[in-house]
Image: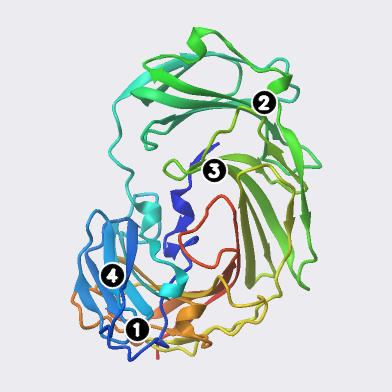
């Protein structure tokens, strides 16, 4: 049940990072980027995923200028009399044989925010297809599992995470047989997870729920887990059931399911706890979690054209209450090469943590694959406006050109609110609520 969370990013931009760009800006000052006294604010922006081929930054209303990443990070000095800034980057990569349509992909993202939104930000470029770090040297961890005392167990996962967080490995067992797992050489954290894979009503086929877990720290590979003794799961290893409640869905919406995860800050790794997790999610027993772990619960609802997503996290197993926002009907932008997305939505209260995103993709005539682009803007950046459009980065070579006339463009748009009002995100205590729509058009 191991999964690589990849900081919860998608192909076309970050899910957690709610900063971005827009075509309307308001500056605290003349927008020139020239300070008139006072210390500047130093903003850092880290790009994960595929290394960008070009990066540009902008302060105030000045044009974009080329910038350089250092260890994946670009630094911007924002003068004291200016609040707005922007970061743009682009990358490309070949797609895996079983990946998305097309032989390659190119992505361009523009994020615009203000110093009121924080000073440390993270975005992703083609994060879902980025190759993992170079694999570490491995050694075999051996052991065996006995869950005969736990009712309903039908499968096991043994998960090992190396000390650097990137040497993650897992093996699935359908019985209590001995295992051999190729884990990172040296000390590993090992989790033994026992699941009940339900295949009959009232749960749907393929449902799975964690029923017991045991944690082992400092298990050295090569070597034997638990000192070579069988791992005997007992009643003290069983999970407990924590309730999930739901507010009323908007009219015409239906639930698309809820999934529960155990996440940790170590390289963004995580483990499925329950899928679906409808009325409850399983909490791990004492001793099976450790500092840096947190629970993540995501629920989705849709009416076919609109989608609502709520993702909440907590470092402790607490009851979760999902309250759905009002629906958002959006027919999309007027077709154009660089369309204007007018993202008017009044379903969120206040202005803290609100951001706007627009995404579109297309297949250009001179590229054997797909282009993905996005613009992201915080409410502080837009200063009361709601419009997003293609950012003008034409002054810096290497960025994508807008789609040509006759191109079939797929688009999506979202309005998001978080429980935090600035970056950096406290990933273990936050809720991200999003409403989105999607569609297509042909460029005139």
Which class describes the residues within 10 Å of circle 3: few (<14), some (14-19), or many (20+)? many
Q: In terms of image quadrants, where is residue 399?
A: bottom left
Q: Residue at x 35, y 77 (%)?
A: 85
Label placed on residue 81: 1
Instruction: Point out the tag, 3 or 1, that comes first from the N-terminus.
Output: 1
Which class describes the residues within 10 Å of circle 2: few (<14), some (14-19), or many (20+)? some
Instruction: Point out the tag, 3 or 2, that comes first from the N-terminus.
Output: 2
Q: What residue is shown with label 2?
A: 154
Q: Residue at x 48, y 47 (%)?
A: 5
**Secondary structure type for disc 1:** loop
Q: How far apart are the alpha carbons under marks 3 and 1?
A: 40 Å
Q: Residue at x 32, y 87 (%)?
A: 61
Which class describes the residues within 10 Å of circle 4: few (<14), some (14-19), or many (20+)? some
Q: Nearer the viewer, mark 4 or mark 3?
A: 4
Q: What residue is shown with label 4?
A: 76
Q: What residue is shown with label 3?
A: 263
Query: Would you say residue 360 is visible in this rendering?
Result: no
């Amino acid at each position: 049940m191991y999964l690589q969370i990849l900081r919860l990013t998608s192909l076309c931009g970050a899910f957690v990072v709610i900063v971005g760009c827009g075509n309307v800006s308001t500056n605290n000052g003349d927008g020139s980027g020239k300070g008139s006294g006072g210390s500047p604010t130093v903003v850092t922006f880290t790009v994960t995923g595929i290394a960008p081929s070009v990066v540009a930054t902008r302060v105030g209303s000045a044009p974009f200028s080329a910038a350089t990443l250092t260890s994946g990070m670009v630094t911007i000095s924002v003068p004291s009399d200016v609040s707005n800034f922007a970061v743009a980057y682009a990358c490309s990569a070949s797609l895996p044989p079983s990946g998305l349509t097309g032989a390659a992909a190119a992505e361009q993202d523009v994020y615009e925010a203000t110093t009121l939104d924080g000073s440390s930000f993270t975005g992703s470029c083609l994060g879902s297809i980025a190759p993992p770090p170079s694999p570490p040297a491995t050694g075999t961890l051996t052991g065996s599992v006995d869950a005969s005392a736990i009712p309903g167990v039908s499968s096991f996962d043994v998960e090992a995470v190396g000390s650097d967080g990137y040497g993650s490995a897992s093996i699935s067992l359908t019985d209590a047989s001995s295992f051999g797992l190729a884990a990172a050489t040296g000390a590993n954290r090992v989790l033994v997870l026992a699941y009940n894979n339900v295949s009959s009503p009232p749960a749907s086929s393929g449902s799975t729920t964690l029923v017991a877990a045991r944690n082992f720290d400092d298990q050295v590979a090569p070597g034997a887990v638990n000192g070579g003794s069988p791992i005997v799961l007992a009643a003290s290893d069983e999970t407990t059931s924590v309730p999930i409640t739901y507010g009323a869905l908007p009219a015409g919406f239906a639930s698309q399911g809820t999934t529960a995860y155990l996440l940790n800050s170590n390289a963004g790794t995580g483990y499925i706890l329950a899928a679906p997790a409808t009325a409850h999610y399983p909490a791990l027993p004492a001793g099976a979690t450790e500092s840096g772990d947190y629970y993540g619960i995501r629920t989705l609802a849709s009416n076919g054209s609109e989608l609502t997503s709520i993702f909440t996290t907590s470092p402790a197993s607490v009851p979760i209450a999902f309250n759905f926002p009002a629906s958002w009907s959006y027919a999309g932008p007027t077709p154009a090469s660089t369309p204007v997305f007018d993202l008017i939505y009044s379903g969120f209260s206040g202005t803290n943590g609100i951001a706007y995103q627009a995404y579109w993709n297309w297949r250009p005539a001179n590229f054997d694959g797909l282009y993905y682009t996005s613009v992201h803007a915080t409410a502080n950046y837009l200063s009361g406006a709601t419009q997003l459009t293609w950012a003008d980065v034409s002054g810096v070579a290497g960025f994508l050109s807008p789609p040509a006339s006759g191109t079939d463009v797929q688009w999506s748009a979202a309005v998001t609110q978080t429980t935090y009002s600035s970056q950096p995100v406290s990933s273990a205590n936050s809720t991200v609520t999003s409403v989105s729509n999607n569609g297509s058009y042909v460029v005139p």
